[in-house]
Image (cartoon, rainbow, N blue to C red):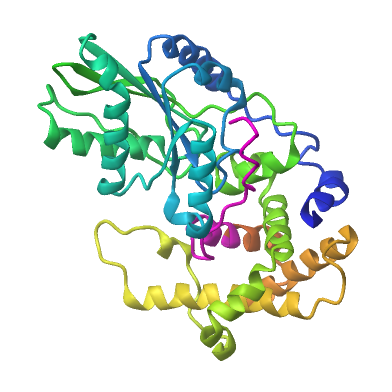
C-alpha cells in the first residue's frame, strides 16, 4: 500500500511524465498498426499474445483484449528468466483457472519455444485437417520480445518442416517500437502455416499511473517519455516497500558484508559490459567489475534502508528515503556531485542493472483472485 500512496501523493503529484499527467506515447505507426492488427485478427486461426513475465497484467494491451478474447489464444509470459520463479507458476495457475492457456517462456531458449509450439499445434489440431492454410499472429506491447520469439520459431521450424524460400529474420532491438511493419513468415506447408509478426502497440494513453510506470520500468515505453529519474523513483519505492534490500543482505551476506570501498583509481564501471559481445568473449575482469557494481548498489540500498527511522507507510518518509538513496548511490557510483546530469546518470545505471536481471528476478504485478476476469 505504501507505494500506491506514494504514487498518489508523491510521484503522482510530481507528474507521471515530463510534462505531467498520464502517459501518451502513441506514434503514428502505432495507430496504423493497431488498425491493421484488428483487421488481420479476423483471419487469424490462433493468437500468441506475448506479455512480459514481470508484469503479466500491466503488459496487456487493453484496447485489443475485446478482439483477443474471442480467438484461440495462448498467453506467452516471456522473459521468465527475469521473473521471480517463486511467483511465476502462480500466474500460470491464475490464467489456467480463468480457462486461458498460458505458458512462461524464454524466447532465447529453444526448449522453451518448442514447448510453446507444441501447445500451438495442439490448439490448432482441430482445424488443421480442414484448412489448407493457417495463420498464427504474434501480438504484444513494445519490447516484450516478440521479434526474438519469431526468430527462435524460425530456427526451430527450419529443422522441423521443409520451408520454402530464404527465411527472414525479424529485427530485434533493446528499444521499444523497433518493428514497425506487419510481416508474414511461412514456417511450414502441408498445411501451410504462417506466423505473422506485428509491431508492438500501446493504448493511446495510460491513465493508471502505476501501470504506466511498470511498463516504463520494463522498457515498453521510451525512457524519454517518462524520464529516467521518475522511473527509478518508482523502482526504489517498490524495492523499499518490499524490503528487497534486506533480502539482499540475507541472500548475499558474504558479498554485502565483505564489500570494501576501494581507492579512487578503481576501474570505471562500464554498463556496456553487460551487453553480449559477438566478436570477442567477455573479459573475466569485466564480469568481476559488474559484480562489484551490483554489490555497491545492493550495499548502498541495504545501508540506507536499514538506517531508515521513518515509516514506509508514510508517503513523505518514503519519498525522503528515496531522495537519500539517490544521493547515496551517486557517491557509491562515484558520479561527481556537480555533474549536471548526475541523477540521470544514476538512474540509467540502475535501470540497466534492473532490466538485465542483475538486481535479481522480479514480478511487479500482484496475482489477482481467480474469480477476476483475464485482462
Residue 182 in picture, x, y percent from top left: 39, 20
Q: Relative to 227, say whether 132 is above or below.
A: above
Q: Is residue 321 left or right of residue 253?
A: right
Q: Is residue 332 left or right of residue 85?
A: right
Quadrant housing residue 359: bottom right
Q: As rendered, which of 272 and 46 lies closer to the eye? A: 46
Residue 45 in picture, x, y percent from top left: 35, 16
Specify start and end residues of the magenta stretch as a single range.
Answer: 349-375
Q: In percent of the image, x 53 and y 37: which residue is there?
A: 97
Q: Is residue 52 left or right of residue 9?
A: left
Q: Relative to 44, say whether 284 is above or below.
A: below
**Quick check: is 357 in the magenta stretch?**
yes
Q: As rendered, which of 295 and 337 lies closer to the eye? A: 295
Q: Relative to 270, say whether 184 is above or below.
A: above
Please, what is the dominant secondary structure of the magenta stretch? Answer: loop
Q: In percent of the image, x 32 and y 48: which residue is there?
A: 108
Q: In percent of the image, x 19 and y 33: which residue is there?
A: 157
The quadrant in which the N terminus is found is bottom right
Amino acid at each position: 500500500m505504501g507505494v500506491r500512496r506514494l504514487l498518489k501523493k508523491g510521484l503522482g503529484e510530481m507528474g507521471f511524465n515530463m510534462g505531467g499527467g498520464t502517459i501518451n506515447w502513441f506514434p503514428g505507426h502505432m495507430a496504423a498498426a493497431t488498425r491493421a492488427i484488428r483487421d488481420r485478427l479476423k483471419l487469424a486461426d490462433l493468437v500468441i499474445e506475448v506479455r512480459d513475465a514481470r508484469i503479466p497484467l500491466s503488459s496487456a494491451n487493453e484496447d485489443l483484449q475485446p478482439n483477443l478474447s474471442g480467438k484461440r489464444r495462448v498467453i506467452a509470459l516471456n522473459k521468465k528468466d527475469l521473473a521471480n520463479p517463486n511467483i511465476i507458476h502462480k500466474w500460470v495457475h491464475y490464467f489456467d483457472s480463468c480457462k486461458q492457456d498460458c505458458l512462461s517462456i524464454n524466447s532465447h531458449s529453444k526448449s522453451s519455444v518448442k514447448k510453446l509450439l507444441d501447445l500451438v499445434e495442439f490448439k490448432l489440431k482441430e482445424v488443421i485437417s480442414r484448412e489448407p492454410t493457417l495463420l498464427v499472429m504474434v501480438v504484444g506491447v513494445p519490447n516484450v520480445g516478440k521479434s526474438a520469439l519469431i526468430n527462435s520459431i524460425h530456427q526451430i521450424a527450419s529443422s522441423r518442416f521443409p520451408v520454402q524460400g530464404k527465411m527472414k529474420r525479424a529485427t530485434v532491438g533493446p528499444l521499444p517500437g523497433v518493428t514497425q511493419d506487419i510481416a508474414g513468415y511461412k514456417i511450414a506447408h502441408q498445411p501451410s502455416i504462417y506466423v505473422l509478426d506485428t509491431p508492438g502497440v500501446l493504448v493511446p494513453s495510460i491513465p493508471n499511473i502505476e501501470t504506466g510506470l511498470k511498463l516504463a520500468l520494463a522498457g515498453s515505453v521510451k525512457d524519454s517519455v517518462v524520464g529516467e529519474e521518475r522511473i527509478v523513483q518508482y523502482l526504489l519505492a517498490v524495492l523499499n516497500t518490499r524490503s528487497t534490500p534486506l533480502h539482499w543482505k540475507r541472500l548475499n551476506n558474504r558479498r554485502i558484508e565483505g564489500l570494501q570501498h576501494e581507492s579512487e583509481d578503481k576501474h570505471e564501471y562500464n554498463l556496456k559490459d553487460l551487453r553480449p559481445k559477438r566478436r570477442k568473449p567477455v573479459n573475466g575482469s569485466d564480469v568481476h567489475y559488474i559484480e562489484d557494481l551490483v554489490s555497491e548498489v545492493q550495499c548502498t540500498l541495504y545501508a540506507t534502508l536499514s538506517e531508515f527511522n521513518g515509516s514506509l507507510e508514510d508517503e513523505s518518509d518514503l519519498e525522503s528515503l528515496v531522495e537519500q538513496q539517490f544521493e547515496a548511490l551517486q557517491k557509491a557510483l562515484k558520479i561527481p556531485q556537480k555533474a549536471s546530469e548526475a541523477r540521470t546518470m544514476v538512474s540509467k545505471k540502475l535501470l540497466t542493472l534492473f532490466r538485465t536481471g542483475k538486481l535479481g528476478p522480479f514480478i511487479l504485478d500482484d496475482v489477482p483472485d481467480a474469480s477476476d476476469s483475464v485482462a
